[in-house]
Structures are given as structure tokens and as C-alpha cells.
Amino acid sequence: MDIAFWIISGITVLGALLAVTLRNLVHCVLSLILFFLGIASHYFLLRADFIGAVQILIYIGAVAVLILFAIMLTRNVTGTEGPRETLGVKWWAGSIIAGTMAAMLTWAIRGDQISQTLPGGDKATTSVAEIGRGFIGDWVVPFEIMAVLLTAALIGAVVIALEEVMKRR
Amino acid sequence: MTIPLGHYLILAGILFAIGLGGALTRKNAIIVLIAIEVMFNAGILNLIAFWHYGHYASLTAQMFAIFAISIAAAESAIGLALVIAVYRHYKSVDVDEMKSLKG
């Protein structure tokens, strides 16, 4: 189990790094899918099966495809042309900020007692039925609000993206 | 499994820093959105890690993770629609060129 953590962590970090550094946009999205798969594998490793399945369905099935469509709608399909990325002062500033943040987080986490916590046996498991009962029980109000929010967001997205087409007619 | 909780927290911190660096350094608006997705996922990984290591008897962490994933999906739909609208206007997705607030 330990070796699985290190392999999946390596894949996840590699996917994230490639997703934000590659030049070709389509390659970026493919690396992003690798990253999402790594995160889903972590969820399976942590025995959160349902969250892992939701991660694959929503992120790889919906978000990645949405980003691919946005790339196709904003440039030619190969996606190589676009703003020239330069290794100027902006790149150095961003990298230094990100590196400092990673170092500070690592330092803070390592210094805290809670980071030594070990899992309490292999009891950690939640059935899908339990989650479903939660949705219609204690969590019904947030669940309904989430439904309204998603509907509003999708209608809003269509309105924003269609605005200019409506004006032209 | 003998991996302590700190390993997951540090992993999430590194992923968050990668996303932050991407969002700060890249010019392409779509890649900025991709970097924001990376940061979202790093945060949600923390929820599930804490659930596994301490509060596995309760549903709360998984519910929070599901709601956070839904909000991230709504955010990316809106963000990409905005990118498409901006592209129609400026004929570019370079975030450095979006300087004007006028319509």
C-alpha cells in the first residue's frame, strides 16, 4: 500500500507540472486528465470509492471535455499558436512565489503534531447507500441549493457565451 | 497502510503551489483555468485525507468533497464561457491583453 502512494503521488505531481508548463494546449489538457486520474486513484486508496467515481465522472468526463471544447472554439484545433510565453520577470516572480509557498506549507505541516497521525485501522469506509441517505436526510437543503446553483451556472454560461450571436441577429 | 497524514497534506500543498505557479506565470486564459482546477483538487484531497485519518465515522467530509466538486464544475463552466466571450471581443485569450473594462 505504501508503494502505491508514492507511485500515484509521482504521477499526480508529474501530471500537474506538465499541465501548467506545456506549450501545446491539447497536451496540457491530456496532462490534466492524468492529474485527475492520479487524484481519483488517491481517493480509491483512501477508501473514498464514491468520491473517486465522482472525480472521474465530473472532472474527466465533463470538465476536461469542456476545456477541450473551449480550446476548439477559441483557436485552431492543434492549439499551438497563441500568446507567446516568455521566461521574463513574470515567470521568475511566479515561480519564486509558488516555490516559497510550497516550502512554507511543507515546513508548517512537518512541524505540527497532527502530521504524524496514522489511520485508525481499515475501518474507514462509507457505502454509497449511506451517502444517498445523507443527501435526502441531513444534507437535503445544501443538496437542493446545489441543484439550483448548477442550473443557474449552466444557464449563465450559455447566456454569456451566446451574447454576441444574439446581438448580431 | 502506514503513510502518515502529513504526507497527504504535503502532497496537497505541493499540488496547490504548482497550480498557483501556473496561474501566476501563464498568459493563456485557458491554462490559468486549468491551474485553478489543479488548486481546487489539491484542496479537496485534503478533505478526503482528513476524513480517512480521523473522522471516517461521519459523512461530513465526503459531503463537503461532493459539494466542492460540484462548485468547481460550475466555476469551470462559467470561466470557460467567459473565456469564449472575451475571445470573441479581443480575438485573443492572452490575459495580459485584457486591460480595458469598457464593453
Image: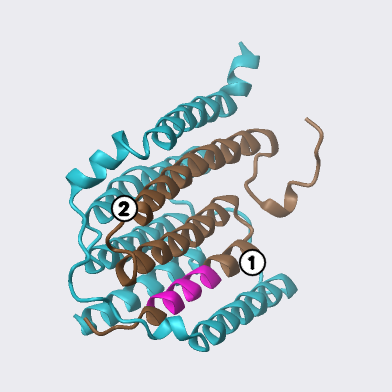
Chain colours: A cyan, B brown
CA gap, disc 2 to disc 1? 38 Å
Write the start and end of the magenta stretch as one range.
B8-18
Proximity of marks 2 and 1: CB atoms separated by less than 8 Å? no
The numbered mark at residue A149 is: none
Q: Which residue is drawn at the image coordinates 45% and 79% (left, top)?
A: B10
Q: SS for tag 1?
A: helix
Tag count in the figure?
A: 2
In the rendered image, residue A24, in percent from the top left (x then y), is placed at 47, 60
Q: SS for tag 2?
A: loop
Residue A131 left/right relative to A163: left
Residue under circle 1? B25
- B15 in magenta: yes
The quarter of the picture where the N terminus of chain B appears is bottom left
As shown in the figure, which amino acid type bears the numbered disc 2?
A: Leu
Residue under circle 2? B59
Neighbour tally class for label 2: few under 14, some 14-19, many 20 plus, Cα within 10 Å: some
Q: Are marks 2 and 1 on the same chain?
A: yes
Question: Quick check: A151 above or below B72?
Answer: above
Q: Main secondary structure of the magenta part?
A: helix
As shown in the figure, which amino acid type bears the numbered disc 1?
A: Thr
In the rendered image, residue B35, in percent from the top left (x then y), is placed at 52, 60
- B78 in magenta: no
User: Sequence order check: which comes first, mark 2 or mark 1?
Assistant: 1
Q: In this rendering, does residue B12 appear at all?
A: yes
Q: Which residue is drawn at the image coordinates 54% and 37% (left, top)?
A: B78
